[in-house]
Amino acid sequence: MNALRSLTRHLSLARNTLPAARQHIHTTNVCRVATAAQPATRGNVMQRVDESLVSEANVDGRRELFSRKNPNGVKPGSVVMVEMLNAPGETTTSTFMGLCIAIRRKGIDTNFTLRNIVMRVGVEQRFSVYSPLIKSIRVLQKPNELRVRRSKLFYLREQPGRVFTSLQSLWKQEQLNKQK
C-alpha cells in the first residue's frame, strides 16, 4: 500500500514536470506496474513475517499451549511452572512457579506474567513464550479449579492470601516428583 502511495506521489510530481504528450504514457506505465505488484503483496506483510518467525520458534508446541482454542492450554488463573536457562551458554536452569495473571498474545512477542509470593513478598515475572532461554513450560493446575472469571487477574495483587497458599503445596509435590 505504501508502494502504491509513493508511486502516486511520484506520478503527481511527474505530471507537473512532463509535457502534456508524455503524461499519458507515463501514467499508463505506472498503473500497469502498480496492478502487477498488487497480487504479490496481498495480505499484511508483517503478519506473514510474524507467522514465519513463530513457526520457526515453535519447536516444542508452545503455539498450541498458548492458543485460545486449546482447552488444555495456559489460561489466566492456571498454575504454571517455567524452567529456564540461566544464560545462553550455560546448562544450569532455574524454575519459577506461579499463577498466570495475564497473557499478551502478539505473535512472536507473546508473553505471560506469573505471580507468586516468595518470602512474604509478591513476585511477578514476565516470560516471552518463544524465548530460546525457556527450556520448558508446564501447566500444573487448570484455571477452572481456582474459579477465576477474568482475562487479567491484576486484582490478586491486593489479595495475596487468597490463591497463593495452594501454590506452596503444589511446589512441594512437584519437587517430590522430580526426586523420584
Image (tube, rainbow, N blue to C red):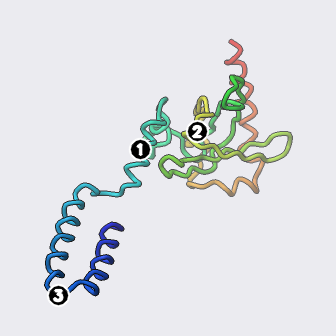
Residue corresponding to mark 2: 131
- From the image, state whether disc 2 or disc 3 is nearer to you: 3
Dots 2, 3 in contact, CB < 8 A: no
Q: Quadrant of the C terminus?
A: top right
Report the amino acid beneath label 3: Ala
Circle 2: residue type: Ser
User: Which label belongs to residue 20?
Assistant: 3
- Name the secondary structure under disc 2: loop
Q: Earlier in the sequence, mark 2 or mark 3?
A: 3
Q: Quadrant of residue 1?
A: bottom left
| Kind of residue at disc 1 | Lys
Asked which secondary structure carries label 3, the reply is helix
Q: Are marks 2 and 1 in contact (CB under 8 Å)?
A: no
Residue 93 place in picture, x, y as percent: 70, 26
Give the mark nearer the N terminus: 2 vs 1: 1
Quick one: 98 or 59, which is closer to the camera?
A: 59
Q: Residue at x 41, y 54 (%)?
A: 46
